[in-house]
Amino acid sequence: MTARNLPEHADNPIHTDGGARAAGFPAAIVAGTTVHAYLTRPIVEAWGMAWLANGSSTVAFLAPVLADDPVDCVPVVTADGSVEVRALVGGELRARLVARPEADAVDDWSRRDGEPLPAHVESLVDGRVDYARRAGDDLALYATAGIVHPCLWSSLANGVMIRHLVEGPWIHTSSRIVHHATALVGATALVEAKVVDRFETRRGIRAVVDVNVSVDGGSVATVRHEALVSLTPTAL
């Protein structure tokens, strides 16, 4: 893939050249959700609808992917049956996604401790649904089956961060995502979230949220989402 930012990413200054340089980076950082979309491609090609309906993954962003970087997504099968997909730029590891063909065991989301945030409703239509294709993942399965791309779950979790926790430029750092069902294009989703951790690091304030996305009363995905919600430019 050739990494690209979409026009809507300019809302976060870190995805613009000027904003990224002000935060200590050489050029615009490509959105984590976009890199996440690239990393899922080999998994969905191999495991298809079964993984989209009942799989799990953890994605971690280890170093920035910059706009126009050539990104190679290399899958490696591990001894325990999971697959690690590595995002490489010039042979250097920038991000990884570790996927399992089945859902990880998860606790009842409603019983987990945390600071509840206001729930909101999202329509799974228009540009949000077309995001992954515009960013570069043109796998036909999604259009053929009429279902949304799995990077939507990290995108909805990003929305929680933006609504309630972000202060200025910010960076998505990792997500753990469990799929419970697929969601059809055009569905209406309820997004519920709670803050489970917030702490200071040398790079800024880091926050962790648990997010549950449901359609028609049934959970389709749960996400543990982590981001630097306030950056310390001199420490980057």
Image: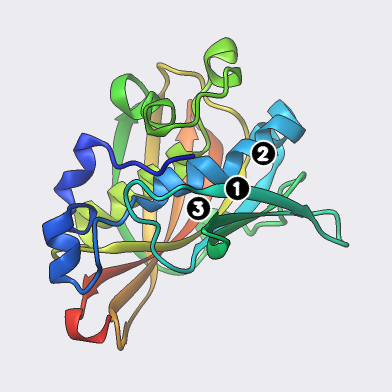
Please tell me how crowded label 3 is: few (under 14), some (14-19), or many (20+) other residues with Cα within 10 Å.
many
Residue receiving disc 3 = 223
Please tell me how crowded label 2 is: few (under 14), some (14-19), or many (20+) other residues with Cα within 10 Å.
some
Residue 17 location (% of width, % of height): 17, 56
**Residue 8 sits above or below residue 196 on the image:** above
Res. 118 visible in picture: no
The amino acid marked with disc number 2 is: Pro
Residue 225 location (% of width, % of height): 44, 60
Residue receiving disc 1 = 73
SS at badge 3? strand
Res. 14 visible in picture: yes
Residue receiving disc 2 = 42
Name the N-terminal-most of marks 2 and 1: 2
| CB-based contact (under 8 Å), mark 3 and mark 2 | no
**Residue 189 sits above or below residue 12 on the image:** above
Name the N-terminal-most of marks 3 and 1: 1
Please tell me how crowded label 1 is: few (under 14), some (14-19), or many (20+) other residues with Cα within 10 Å.
many
SS at badge 1? strand
